[in-house]
């Protein structure tokens, strides 16, 4: 196996005081343990072959706050920290470990939480768009192209890095 893309994730909408404990545990299990477990079983094969690229799905929410995304943000921040730690451990085996940090990408995931988290999904969509300098949502292809880049040797000098695919959401608003 040359490439492992730990992409599965769920949203778990809610502020800390709103989230039930079983939802908290489920989001942590899917978003964080869901990176650990596949990695645990794939990495030994990569170590044997002394090559591999692992891509962990974080989110720009790891860097910026977002309303009612407490456990989601916590897991995505943890994935970013885990990515850096994994890179230190596996660089000696020529395995690269990087993270993707998308902004808002129009997928069923976003359509679902727009419906579940907001009274007015259209208004919420416009607010989310305005957070990104692009003023548009990203597409699944935007993220897929970034993942392909990290999977390929074109990114061979990129180790332990966050790659932002966020329409300027993180750095654009800091100026
Ligand atoms: N869409 C966005 O705006 C956005 C932004 C930043 C990060 N992300 C991250 O990108 C990743 C993909 O999200 P998406 O927008 O394509 O969402 P999506 O809901 O369209 O896809 C999520 C995928 O994860 C899979 N999945 C969920 N729980 C699983 C489990 N327990 N075991 C195995 N597979 C499971 C689902 O089957 C689905 O294929 C997620 O980690 C998400 O947090 C999405």
Image: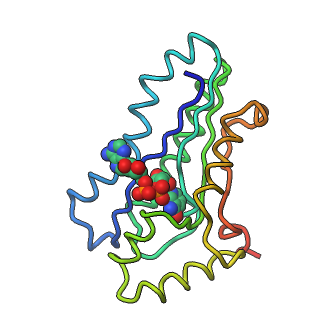
**Point 48% across, 84% down: residue:** 124
From what the image shows, is residue 124 above or below residue 78?
A: below
**Point 62% across, 30% down: residue:** 53
Q: Left or right? Give the position of 47 relative to 132.
A: left
Name the quadrant of the C terminus.
Answer: bottom right
**In which quarter of the view is residue 172 placed?**
bottom right
Counting from the top left corner in percent of width and height, residue 63 is at 59, 62
From what the image shows, is residue 54 above or below residue 110?
A: above
Q: Left or right? Give the position of 150 relative to 83.
A: right
In front here: 40 or 122?
Answer: 122
From what the image shows, is residue 105 above or below residue 154?
A: below
**Point 40% across, 66% down: residue:** 70
Q: Residue furthest top?
A: 48
Q: Left or right? Give the position of 90 relative to 121.
A: right
Q: Is residue 30 visible?
A: no
In front here: 92 or 6?
Answer: 6
Colouring chosen for the image of the structure? rainbow
Counting from the top left corner in percent of width and height, residue 151 is at 66, 35
Counting from the top left corner in percent of width and height, residue 101 is at 60, 55
**In which quarter of the view is residue 110 placed?**
bottom left
In front here: 82 or 152?
Answer: 152
**In which quarter of the view is residue 114 placed?**
bottom left
**Point 20% across, 56% down: residue:** 22
Name the quadrant of the N terminus.
Answer: top right
Q: How many marks?
A: 0
From what the image shows, is residue 68 above or below residue 61?
A: below
Q: Is residue 9 visible?
A: yes
Counting from the top left corner in percent of width and height, residue 164 is at 67, 56
């Amino acid at each position: 196996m040359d490439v492992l893309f730990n992409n599965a994730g769920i949203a778990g909408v809610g502020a800390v005081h709103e989230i039930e404990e079983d939802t908290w545990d489920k989001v942590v299990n899917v978003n964080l343990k869901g990176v650990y477990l596949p990695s645990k079983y794939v990495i030994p094969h990569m170590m044997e072959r002394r090559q591999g690229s692992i891509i962990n799905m974080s989110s720009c929410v790891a860097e910026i706050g977002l309303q009612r995304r407490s456990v989601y943000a916590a897991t995505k921040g943890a994935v970013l920290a885990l990515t850096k730690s994994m890179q230190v451990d596996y660089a000696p085996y020529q395995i690269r470990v990087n993270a993707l940090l998308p902004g808002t990408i129009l997928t069923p995931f976003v359509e679902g939480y727009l419906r579940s988290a907001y009274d007015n999904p259209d208004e919420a969509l416009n607010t989310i768009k305005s957070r990104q300098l692009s003023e548009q949502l990203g597409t699944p292809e935007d993220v897929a192209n970034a993942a392909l880049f990290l999977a390929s040797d074109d990114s061979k000098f990129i180790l332990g890095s966050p790659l932002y695919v966020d329409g300027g959401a993180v750095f654009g608003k800091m100026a």
